[in-house]
Image (cartoon, rainbow, N blue to C red):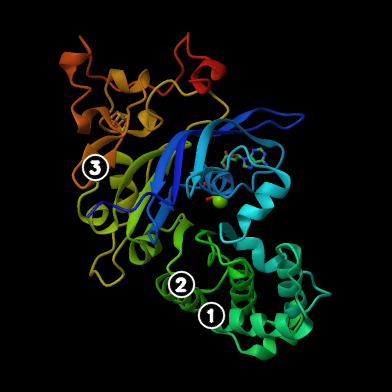
Amino acid sequence: MAAAPPLLEAKDVNVVYEPARGVRIWSVRDVSLSLAPGEFVGLVGESGCGKSTLGFALTRMLRAPARMPSGEIVFDGQDIASLDGEPLRRQRRGGFALVLQSGMNALNPVRTVGRHIGDILKAHATDGEKWSRSAIRERGAELLGKVRLEPDVLDRYPHELSGGMRQRVSIALALALEPRLVVFDEPTTALDVIVQQAVMKTIKDLQREEGFTAILISHDLGVVLEATDRVMVMYGGEIVEDQPSSALLTGPHHPYTEALLGCYADPRADEIELGGIPGTPPDLSLPAGGCPFTARCPEAIEICGTVDPELTPLGRGVAACHVRAGTGTAASVPGTAAAVPHQATADTTEENRHAR
Ligand SMILES: Nc1ncnc2c1ncn2[C@@H]1O[C@H](COP(=O)(O)OP(=O)(O)OP(=O)(O)O)[C@@H](O)[C@H]1O
Ligand code: SF4
Ligand SMILES: [Mg+2]
């Protein structure tokens, strides 16, 4: 049987922050990815590596000073990267939604939960569609039920709800337009660990029940591995590995993924030895000139500092590493074996790299 076409395909997406004053930051660098209908995919990486920016780009939520200078985003066969205004608003219905960590704090304190739901339904009503008060309450109660909240929450104000309840409300709001893709950006990070687990369970159950495609963005690899089918690992604005979750746990291919896994300890182990990743992430205001992990990688060879490795099939997924893919042996780089710092070569300017 032929595989279903992807729900979303992104190709060579670049995102840059260009503040009026201050430096330009290239946060997402030539990212390509594909999401199958109904897939639950994780996106992990250290703070500042570009996860949220990529999530915003995929759901068309980038705001100034962010800009997407190049790249394609095709959702359900339609190019959404170039949509704006009314056509983009129409695509949101049955399209794509974003749940933010801060979403629970963005609720309007003087509006009840029911009013929030009504506002979204009315704002995205199709031609001639009317939302009566009773229809809003009926749909609102249905949405709250999906996130395991009682219908009486419709009449409550945000300050009357716990953090976990507010985050459930923001998930219900994201589901109001029946999206086929939901990006959850650190949806439980602001909650205590018990509430975190309960909300994560609801997200997992919901994804299965509703069948939407989901991306779970988190810096917590443990949470992502437990919840998702597949994990994309991001580093320095790039996807450096993409594997089924089970394969990533037992057989990572990228040295950064290995280092990341080394940062997690089994709390039941007799002796807990926590690893760390020495060094700091690359400066995203600098143009890339090679593998972004070069300066911190114990396996780096000379080619790593000048040529950015492509994602190559390895095991059950793909990874971008010269050494692991066998494209960076000493034979291919005469006279080399030493680690070199991550830096741009003289002829690699920001514009020509991102204009590719
Ligand atoms: N509004 C902004 N203006 C300028 N630079 C920004 C802005 N927002 C993010 N950046 C920069 O873009 C890069 C990627 O940021 P992003 O928020 O996407 O990372 P992240 O992986 O989501 O991090 P975290 O795990 O901390 O949420 C960072 O270097 C950050 O400094
Ligand atoms: S390409 Fe080189 S620097 Fe990058 S992860 Fe592989 S060995 Fe390390
Ligand atoms: Mg983020």
Q: Which residue is mark 3?
A: 253
N-terminal label among 1 and 3: 1
Q: Which residue is mark 1?
A: 146
- The front one of 210 and 267 is 210
Pointers 1 and 2 in contact (C-beta within 8 Å): yes
Residue 151 pos. (x, y %): 65, 89
- The front one of 277 and 171 is 171
Label 3 CA crowd tier, 10 Å (few <14, some 14–19, many 20+) = many
Residue 316 pos. (x, y %): 21, 48
Label 1 CA crowd tier, 10 Å (few <14, some 14–19, many 20+) = many
Residue visible at 84% across and 75% down in the picture:
110
Instruction: Please say whether residue 313 is visible from this viewpoint.
Output: yes
Pointers 1 and 3 in contact (C-beta within 8 Å): no
N-terminal label among 1 and 2: 1
Residue 63's place in the image compared with 93, above or below, is above
Residue 203 pos. (x, y %): 47, 71
Residue 111's place in the image compared with 16, above or below, is below
